[in-house]
Image (tube, helix red, strand yellow):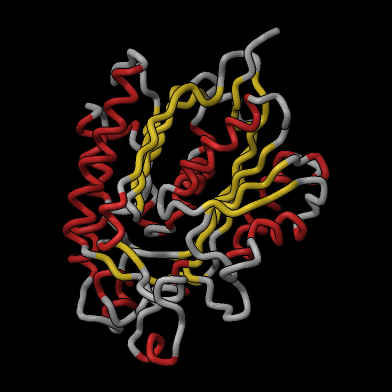
Amino acid sequence: MNTITAAITAVGAYVPDFVLTNKALEAMVDTNDEWITSRTGIKERRILKDEDKGTSFLAVKAAQDLLAKANIDPLEIDLLIMATATPDMPVAATGVYVATQIGATNAFAYDLQAACSSFLFGMSTAAAYIESGRYKKVLVIGADKMSSIVDYTDRSTCIIFGDGAGAVLFEPNYEGLGLQDEYLRSDGIGRDFLKIDAGGSLNPTTIQTVKDNKHNIIQDGKTVFKYAVTNMADSSELILKRNNLTNEDVDWLVPHQANKRIIDATANRMNLEDAKVLMNIDKYGNTTSATLPLVLNDFEHLFKKGDVIILAAFGGGFTWGSIYLKWAYDKK
């Protein structure tokens, strides 16, 4: 019996129509386009303005895009993994609702939260389900409505984050393509440096927590940047060494889109030429769980069957890692 590997066989994505430019942010906080661009690489980000729509709306749209492009019946999906840091609500799992909304009524579903590493960890989880032989089609969606937890008077965070969603389908592969190796790590030291203070069991919502603006994301930018640069670069370099890969073997780097300087540091450590480093941070900003699938979707037309792709991410907690993937198809 041939060994089963888990390969991506389809991708999809969705971003809201509303564009929040750096110029617009200049009227909201003390910042400017030159500063934002030079420090982050971000020029604009998409925002879901509808107050009655949450992360599930973005996720449903991305999933429907994938299903339509790949001509897949949602009833064939066995499992849906919803990677998100901004679920619709604290208890009822967003992924369960999304599965029902797209007609994947034969699937079981759940949410996975590892901040900006959520989608990377979700890929690992999906691969394990496929490799077990028990499941044939696993849909992984990365979606976040970051605008729902951003304080637009805080220039350290409001310039960074945007809203969006991306989805990939994992299926069994018998040609040795798909996920080859992974290096995933976490460290609770990061708990104090990137967080939302209130709304959880440690500090439940009260009138006072709302008055004190404790429900929006805060970060110690310098500390997060230092850890992100080190760990994303380290994990990417390690995955190459462990698999006897050189920079010449790597066709594409798909990095988490948090900051262009972090991406550049990771690419430099891997000694990769700029043409191999895929970025769309200028268009979307940091969409947290959605960054990796949005890159895969935007650059799908460049990928060829057998291409070696390294994916890397770093998120709050701290969480981080890299995945070595061989692309499984040529876009028709």
Residue 130 occupies quadrant: top right
Question: At x 73% / y 54%, what residue is drawn?
Answer: 99
Q: Which quadrant of the rendered structure holds the C terminus?
A: top right
- Place of residue 235 in the rendered image (x, y in percent of width and height, measured from the top left): 30, 33
Horizontal placement of 305 versus 233: left or right?
Answer: right
- Place of residue 278 in the rendered image (x, y in percent of width and height, measured from the top left): 38, 40
Q: Nearer the viewer, residue 35 or 118?
A: 118
Q: Residue furthest top?
A: 1
Question: At x 21% / y 75%, what residue is drawn?
Answer: 31
Instruction: Report whether residue 248 is seen.
Output: no
Question: At x 37% / y 91%, what residue is drawn?
Answer: 211
Instruction: Report whether residue 190 is seen.
Output: yes
Q: Residue furthest front?
A: 202
Q: Nearer the viewer, residue 239 or 73?
A: 239
Question: At x 31% / y 31%, what residue is drawn?
Answer: 236
Horizontal placement of 181 versus 57: left or right?
Answer: left
Q: Nearer the viewer, residue 322 or 278?
A: 322
- Place of residue 102 in the rendered image (x, y in percent of width and height, measured from the top left): 76, 55
Q: Which quadrant of the rendered structure holds the N terminus?
A: top right
